[in-house]
Image: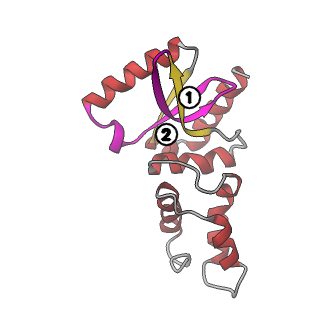
Amino acid sequence: MDCAGSDPRRVGALVEQAAVLRLLDVAAIDRILDGPRRRGTKHLRRVLEPWRRYRPGIRIRSRTEAKLLPLLTEGALPIPETNAKIRVGRKTYEVDFLWHRQRLVVETDGGRFHDNPQAGSRDSGHNRTLTGAGFLISRLGSEDLRDRPEATMDELARLLRERS
């Protein structure tokens, strides 16, 4: 809260990190914001707005995942399950985002989990298995969310429409 009057990008990054750490409590922040006026209140409310539709304690594991959720809100896309488990045969796979009815999976490929040869091989195997089970897999990198967010959301909206 004390950082709300600082650089707007920093505030957004702090909210994302709080979400990853499962510390983001929008309702608690709103209670503070409803109190005495503070510098940065208006900006913090604007940063928090896309997060209001997600349940408290939503499970996300990376800043790349945290960057996607507000974009989904801004694009008026349906709320996905996050870090959902999919069972195929005897194996269970955890995927970053799942729209179960449309059988659409979105994986956000950040460096922490995907920047090594073993991860590439693992991801390819998961893709083949899930695709074989009827799921469509879309992989997004941080550059998709940073450099072309509108085009990325348009593509996700198209995929969701086509699979409805």
Which residue is farthest bottom? Answer: 36
- Disc 2 or disc 1, which is closer to the eye? 1
Q: Which amino acid, by three-letter code, is at mark 2?
A: Asp
- What is the x, y in percent for residue 124? 38, 21
Question: In the drawing, does residue 154 fall left or right of residue 16?
Answer: right
Q: Is residue 91 magenta?
A: yes
Instruction: In the displayed orientation, state which residue is furthest to the top.
Output: 132
User: For the point 39% across and 42% down, which residue is it?
Assistant: 110
Residue contact between numbered discs 2 and 1, judged by CB atoms under 8 Å:
no
Instruction: Assess whether residue 154 is covered by the magenta stretch.
Output: no
Return the residue found at the far front: 90
Q: Quadrant of the N terminus?
A: bottom right
Residue at the image position 54 percent from the left and 14 percent from the top: 133
Residue located at (49% from left, 15% from top): 89
Is residue 117 toward the left or the right of residue 138 in the image?
left
Q: Quadrant of the C terminus?
A: top right
Instruction: Pinpoint residue 48: horizontal percent, then vertical percent.
Output: 64, 63
Callout 2: few (<14), some (14-19), or many (20+) C-alpha neighbours within 10 Å?
some
With respect to residue 105, does 31 lie above or below? below
- In this rendering, the count of numbered labels is 2
User: Horizontally, is 109 left or right of 164 in the view?
Assistant: left
- The residue beneath circle 1 is 105
Q: Which mark is residue 78?
A: none
Residue 41 drawn at (x, y percent): 65, 77
Rounded to the nearest angstrom, the CA distance separating label 2 from label 1 is 16 Å
What amino acid type is highlighted by mark number 1? Val
Give the magenta-colored segment's residue range. 89-116
| Image quarter of residue 152 | top right
SS at circle 1: strand
Secondary element at tag 2? helix
Q: Nearer the viewer, residue 54 or 90?
A: 90
- Which mark identifies residue 144? 2
